[in-house]
Amino acid sequence: MAKELTPDVMILDISMPDLSGVIVARDVRKLKTHTELLIFTMHDSEQLVREVLSAGARGFVLKSASTENIIAAVASLLNHKPYFCPGITDAVLRGYLSPGGHGLGEVIEGSESLTTRELLIVQLLAESRSNKVIASMLDISVKTVESHRGNIMRKLGAHSLADIVRYAIRNKLIEA
């Protein structure tokens, strides 16, 4: 639909029923349209903000934000300017400026060595997606998903899928 309709602004939730808002954002960016992407979610972790920024979103508003914040976000994006609700801006700046903080788009803080792609796969695994479904969603091979999954388990010291799900819940990659 994004390709056909080429909207000025798309509002995406991270926890949509079939696809993660991050995956949709990446797919829209691949279309090379001028559509601006606004993430509207209840999740406020710094690592999630980093993930959606690397996926191409330029706006982030919490569901708890005021109506004025939502209107301001859409207006800002219509003018091709980024918008982050105040609490999110503070969190991103604190993480970015803190000693030993990582720049945006690098390895996500708190997960020590998981890449953004690996975090996305953790989220999809925790949502009970099979390797085959994840491969299809991300347009990669099943073997690549299996390789990522092995790396994730090694990096997290995980011994089972349940360990990955616990990690995803603790780090607010999925709703409990």
Image (tube, rainbow, N blue to C red):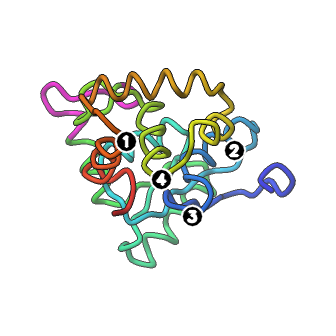
Question: Which of the labelled discs sits on residue 74, or is there none?
Answer: 3
Question: Where is residue 77, by image quadrant?
Answer: bottom right
Q: Main secondary structure of the magenta part?
A: loop
**Disc 3 or disc 2, which is closer to the eye?**
2
State the CA–CA distance, disc 1 to disc 2. Answer: 30 Å
Question: Which of the labelled discs sits on residue 132, or is there none?
Answer: none
Q: Amino acid at mark 4?
A: Glu
Question: Which of the labelled discs sits on residue 161, or is there none?
Answer: 1
Residue with the mark numbered 2:
28
Q: Amino acid at mark 3?
A: Val
Q: Residue 28 location in percent, x, y? A: 69, 44
- Mark 2 crowd level (few <14, some 14–19, many ≥20, 10 Å Cα): many
Using the image, determine if residue 110 lies above or below residue 12.
above
Give the residues drawn in magenta, as a range: 95-106
Badge 2 marks a residue whose secondary structure is: helix
State the CA–CA distance, disc 3 to disc 1. Answer: 38 Å
Q: In the image as oriented, which residue stretches furthest toward the right? A: 4
Using the image, determine if residue 101 lies above or below residue 65.
above
